[in-house]
Amino acid sequence: MLKYEWKNGWHMVRLRVLAGLGILIFIGNILVNELMPMNESMVSFGDCWLQLFLGKPEYIRTPDSEFELPVLWFLFYSYLLFLVCSYPADDLKGIGIQGILRCQNRQKWFLSKAVWCMEMVLLYFVAQFLIFMGSVQLYNLQNTGNQIFSSLRAFSATNMDMCTLYILPVLVGIVLCLLELILTLISGPVVSYIIMLTYLIVSVYVNRGWLLANHAMLLRNRVLIETGRKTMNGVAECAIVCLVIILAGITYIEKMDIISRREQG
């Protein structure tokens, strides 16, 4: 089923993938131009990566405070969610239901969709990383090391902290897409997408433990903020939530009335 998922899923989202590449190139170009004056043309792809996931400091409401959304961060994750939101539901209305009936194993169907989502997340992040590398080369910048990384050393960041700063945004992306997967099966792609966008916005507005998207914002991490979130706690929380979502999805798909859902679609 994994081979089927890869082939069929890629076919159904191919136009979104092409549009997504354009968005990622746009993000890369904006970030490089933001960093060049800041670092005197010594910019690395790692700097671009961390700049994208800086996010915003924890919002504290005061009479003079203004709520600001990290636009590029929000654009990056919102398009990732758009990329994967409709395929599982569309497949269930099409030939995907035949696969379920033939193999008589709904768990395999859901797990294959979960694996497909994770593959798309990884490819999305790899594409952005490669675009950052290409942008640095295109602008003929002096790739002499990570300027932001160097400044983080002043905050006593360990090597493990530095690694998890790369890993956490990816794990958050996987959590978001898996959560969207199960919401799509319950309420449909449009409603689930709106819910997930709301979740992202609320995560910027409120810094709470259950809002895991906060882990994808460096300015809310203990590496920079003494009261921020611990990097390893973020990794553990994302892993646990992924497992819970998968178990919940398996339970739901076993009880789901697939035939009625297809007729409604």
Image (cartoon, rainbow, N blue to C red):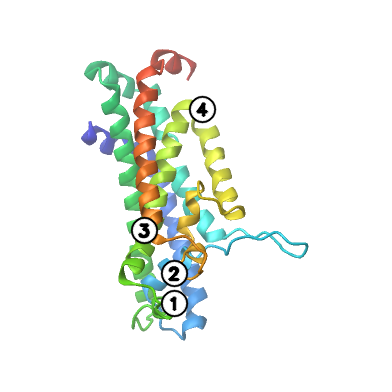
Which of the 4 image quadrants contains residue 129?
bottom left
Q: Are marks 3 and 4 in contact (CB under 8 Å)?
A: no
Q: Are marks 2 and 1 in contact (CB under 8 Å)?
A: yes
Q: CA distance from mark 2 to mark 1?
A: 6 Å
Query: In the rendered image of this protein, does residue 17 appear above or below residue 260?
Result: below
**Residue at the spot of label 2:** 223
As helix, strand or loop, the secondary structure at mark 1 comes to: loop
Q: Nearer the viewer, residue 134 or 247?
A: 247
Q: Residues within 10 Å of mark 4 (few under 14, many from 20)?
A: few
Q: CA distance from mark 4 to mark 2?
A: 38 Å
Q: Residues within 10 Å of mark 3 (few under 14, many from 20)?
A: some
Mark nearer the N terminus (4 vs 2):
4
Quadrant in which the N terminus is drawn: top left
**Residue at the spot of label 3:** 232
Mark nearer the N terminus (1 vs 3):
1
Residue type at mark 3: give it: Met
Q: CA distance from mark 3 to mark 4?
A: 33 Å
Which dot, 4 or 1, sits closer to the camera? 1
Mark nearer the N terminus (2 vs 1):
1
At 66% from the left edge and 61% from the top edge, which residue is drawn? 60
Q: Are marks 1 and 3 in contact (CB under 8 Å)?
A: no
At 44% from the left edge and 56% from the top edge, which residue is drawn? 22
Mark nearer the N terminus (2 vs 3):
2
Q: Residues within 10 Å of mark 2 (few under 14, many from 20)?
A: many
**Residue at the spot of label 1:** 155
Mark nearer the N terminus (3 vs 4):
4
**Rendered location of residue 253, percent (x, y):** 37, 23
